[in-house]
Amino acid sequence: MNLTSSHPFWSVNNGLPANYPSLQRDVSCDAVVVGGGITGALVAVHLVEAGVKTLLIDKRDIGTGSTSASTALLQYEIDVPLRKLIQKVGPAAATRSYQLCSESIGKLERLAARLKIDCGFERRPSLFLARHQREIPELREEFKLRRAMGLELQFLDSAAIEKRFHFARPAALLSRAGGQVDPHRLTHGLVAAGKRAGLEVCDRTEMQRMDQTRRGVRITTKSGFKITARRAVIAAGFESKALLQGEAGTLLSTYALISEPLPKIAAWHRQCLIWESGSPYLYLRTTREGRVIVGGEDEDFVNAKRRDALISQKTRTLVNKFARLFPEVKLEVAFAWAGTFATTKDGLAYLGVHPRFPHAYFALGYGGNGITFSLIAAEIIRDGFLGRENSDSSIFRFGR
Ligand SMILES: Cc1cc2nc3c(=O)[nH]c(=O)nc-3n(C[C@H](O)[C@H](O)[C@H](O)COP(=O)(O)OP(=O)(O)OC[C@H]3O[C@@H](n4cnc5c(N)ncnc54)[C@H](O)[C@@H]3O)c2cc1C
């Protein structure tokens, strides 16, 4: 499956920071992580740091799947608002999910700092903008629920929005927790740090088959080598659907652009992350170099050809939507790209053991905030290997 159009910004900008040898022998290990995107990289680092003998494989180069296309807003806000998530999964699981996503932003920041990964991590507040007056009562309820669970946020009415941004919108939530990163550099930095700690890494190594054995798993690579492990971790992104036969998640095509560097936009309060409600939604962030990323315009995924054929049209729409918010800014598009991602009915990722694969953990970072789920997955899976109970694992289990 082709996960992104040919030029996602990060891999064009960064080139290939490192490559690794492909697997050319049979091996055995405690854990084999299949997939070297942000999820596999986080899982692998957590495992090696916990003393688990780990092999990471990827059929492409590291970080060139969906991770290279990700706009990498780090938000605690799950695709499904808290008030709706409470109805779907109950108050305890819903509030805990929001809390976990919020905590994971700080954990990613500390991990990148501790491992000295230069990945442009920056803290940013997060603005959720309502588009219509009729959304105000729901937003007030959302505000109360989030405040009650301890999240730091403000309710902004139209006057408060105009003071900070100059555009007119009926209401918004401005949250303290949020961040942004270069996901490609973060992934490469994690894999390099994992390698220094004893991780074995093989790219251009494709899992073709996975068999469950009495004691673990046996993976056969496309080149015919065997990997025997106590457990596999399937962090193969949206291609994991092939193993799960379409059970988890719905695929969408999504679009993004990045501008040429711009002078600081004064009417953009603290260069916060911006998410505007609606279907399709719109989101914006900046980068350390002063570029602006605009994304959204999702539609059902049909095939990669159709997805990529729409890039020019979707880019025009994104530019026009940006201009409605910041009419005084002349935005010049440097790159535009498309990617595929998956959503679930409750907006939560699927993490954990699948009944058909008792010796494999799945780490499927689905949804608009897949990266925060990747961190949560790494912790749950690490605890599973260490035989530690993790009470959060049931929130993300298959068949919930
Ligand atoms: C345009 C776009 C914008 C996004 N914006 C955001 C955002 O703002 N914030 C956010 O948190 N998330 C965002 N996401 C989602 C986020 O990018 C994903 O959740 C995340 O990148 C998934 O990472 P991953 O490691 O699970 O998957 P991937 O990066 O796809 O990595 C999976 C890896 O597995 C490998 N693989 C697959 N099959 C095999 C096999 N059989 N054998 C060996 N290797 C295999 C692939 O080659 C790939 O490298 C966005 C996604 C897109 C497309």
Image (spheres, grey):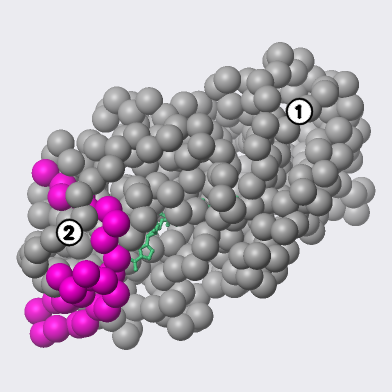
Numbered circle sitting on residue 332? 1
Q: Residue at x 34, y 34 (%)?
A: 17
> As displayed, is residue 268 above or below residue 169?
above
- Residue 393 visible within the image: no
Q: Earlier in the sequence, mark 1 or mark 2?
A: 2
State the residue in front, 303 or 148. 303
Q: Residue at x 13, y 39 (%)?
A: 197
Is disc 1 in contact with disc 2, using a CB cutoff of under 8 Å? Answer: no
- Residue 123 visible within the image: yes
Magenta span: 198-225
In the picture of the structure, the residue carrying the numbered disc 2 is 23
Helix, strand or loop under label 1 = loop
Query: Does residue 392 appear left or right of residue 101 in this picture?
Result: left
Q: Quadrant of residue 276?
A: top right
State the residue in front, 202 or 374. 202
Asked whether residue 12 is drawn in magenta, I would say no
Q: Residue at x 14, y 83 (%)?
A: 213
At label 2, the amino acid type is: Leu
State the separation of the CA atoms marked 1 and 2: 43 Å
Q: Residue 285 location, x and y as percent?
A: 65, 33
Q: Residue 273 location, x and y as percent?
A: 65, 34
Q: Quadrant of residue 45?
A: top left
Query: Does residue 314 appear left or right of residue 107 in this picture?
Result: right
State the residue in front, 91 or 382. 382
Numbered circle sitting on residue 190? none
Q: Residue at x 92, y 48 (%)?
A: 133
Q: Residue 147 location, x and y as percent?
A: 62, 43
At label 1, the amino acid type is: Glu
Respond yes or no on whether mark 1 lies under 8 Å from ligand 1. no
Neighbours of disc 1 within 10 Å: few (<14), some (14-19), many (20+): some
Helix, strand or loop under label 2 = loop
> As displayed, is residue 295 above or below residue 339?
above
